[in-house]
Structure formats: structure tokens, C-alpha cells
Amino acid sequence: EVQLVESGGGLVQPGGSLRLSCVASGFTFSRYAMSWVRQAPGKGLEWVSGISGSGSSAYYADSMKERFTISRDNSKNTLYLQMDSLRAEDSAVYYCAKDPLRLINTFDIWGQGTLVTVSS
Amino acid sequence: QSALTQPASVSGSPGQSITISCTGASSDIGYYNYVSWYQQHPGKAPKLMIYDVSKRPSGVSSRFSGSKSGNTASLTISGLQAEDEGDYHCSSYTTSGTLVFGGGTKLTVL
């Protein structure tokens, strides 16, 4: 079964850091680009960052470019998102998603999401 | 990059057809044929319904169709069913090399 399972969310104070993980199974992880997409409570989806299958190319939404770092370990079938200098507005459910076609394009498989809450 | 514009809500009766619009700019929807649509039920992850403007993934009902004209993409659902109720999100690749989503549309089946 093709599956993505996120972890690492939780409560963090403003200015703090958090690292999210996403473990993939059921497909050849290294062949596909991956992205992180977030959704604040009651709001729409927001693309955060994407990375190529090899990990050599990474892209970010402007508002997160200086604070977030996407990476992957293909030997562990795992995608990461390092989030630093967190703000209240970063509070959201964070999903990892698989791109079947091309980098940062469309997402056919999504994880169940992990909740990040930034609050003092 | 500004978010794509979707109506906040649409509604329809079972059996009817509805269309959800998604308006962007010449730097996203108007430039690429890389528009996707996602269905999301409460508390669940999004599900891909349409990609590359009008292509349906395997397993998605033919009642769902997509199109594009200029800077506006549309999702049409024909033969509306109760299970279609939920939120629908559009997205487009942009000339900045990023992805932009719409604000989401809540579909109510009356």
C-alpha cells in the first residue's frame, strides 16, 4: 500500500524550532519529487516547499524561504522539514505529498498530516 | 505570489451540475496547463481529482471534469451526489517556480 506518515508536530514557542518527518512506503521514494503543504485551521491549503527526487533541487514559498529547510534521505525513504524562527502564523496541519509527474506540480498521495501549534 | 481566487461556497441539489471557478493570473493559470483540483472532507487529507487542467487520475469518477480559459480554470461536477459534499481546492504552477493554491470552495449538496 502506498503510504505517507508524518510525525514531529507539536506545541512550540514563538521563535522556536521543529523538525517534521514523513516516512514513505509502497513506492520507489527516490524516483519522485515531494512537497510539504500546510493548512491553518479553517483555511485553505498553502504550498510550503518542494524537493526533487534526488534531493539536488529545492524550492520554497517566499514567506518561508529563510526559515524552513526541506531535505530527504532516500536510504530511509524519509522527507524532512526543518522549521526555525517559528511564528504564530505558522500554526497549521502540515502534510507531505508525493508528486507523480514533475517537481512542484500535482500531488497524488498525501499523508494524514501533523499539527504544529506555535504559541507561548 | 497571490493565492488563486475561488468562490467561498457553492451549492446544488442531487443530480444537478455545478461549476467551481479558480481565477489566477498570466503568470500561473494563464501560462501553464498545470492546474490541479483536490477534494477534501472534514478532518481528512486532500484527494487529487483533476490534474493538468482536465486529466482524471485512475479511480476518479467521470462526473468530475476540468477546463481552462485564459487565467481561469473550472471544475465541473455533474450528477451531483451527497458524497461530493466537501471542500475543493485548486492549484497552479507559477512562473516563479512555485505552486499557488486557491482559498478553497465549500460545496454543499442540498
Image (cartoon, rainbow, N blue to C red):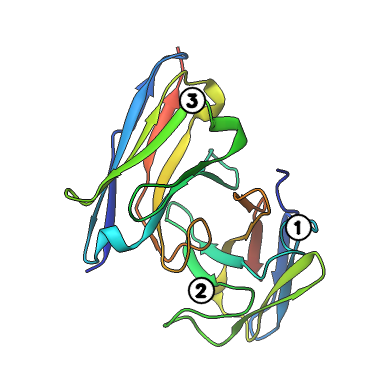
The amino acid beneath tag 2 is Glu
Give A38 or A42, whichever is nearer the viewer. A38
Classify A81 as above or below B50: above
Residue receiving disc 2: B83
Is the residue at mark 1 from the same chain as the one at mark 3?
no
Classify A102 as above or below A115: below
Tell me the distance, in whole angstroms, between the alpha carbons under discs 3 and 2.
39 Å
Residue drawn at the location 73% of the way across and 74% of the way down: B19
- Place of residue A93 in the rendered image (x, y in percent of width and height, measured from the top left): 44, 40
**Placement of the N terminus of chain B among the 4 image quadrants:** top right
Q: Which mark is residue A42?
A: none
Tell me the distance, in whole angstroms, between the alpha carbons under discs 2 and 1.
20 Å
Q: Judge depth for marks 2 and 1 and give the one in front.
A: 1
Residue A73 quadrant:
top left
> Does residue B44 appear in the picture of this structure?
yes
Tell me the distance, in whole angstroms, between the alpha carbons under discs 1 and 3.
32 Å
- Place of residue A111 in the rendered image (x, y in percent of width and height, measured from the top left): 35, 53
Residue drawn at the location 68% of the way across and 53% of the way down: B95
Residue receiving disc 3: A67
- Place of residue B43 in the rendered image (x, y in percent of width and height, measured from the top left): 43, 51
Q: Earlier in the sequence, mark 2 or mark 1?
A: 1
**Is B22 on the left or on the right of A51, as rendered?**
right
Classify B20 as above or below A82: below
Label 2 marks which chain's residue?
Answer: B
**Placement of the C terminus of chain B among the 4 image quadrants:** bottom right
Residue receiving disc 1: B7
Mark 3: secondary structure: loop
Residue drawn at the location 43% of the way across and 27% of the way down: A117
Classify A6 as above or below B38: above
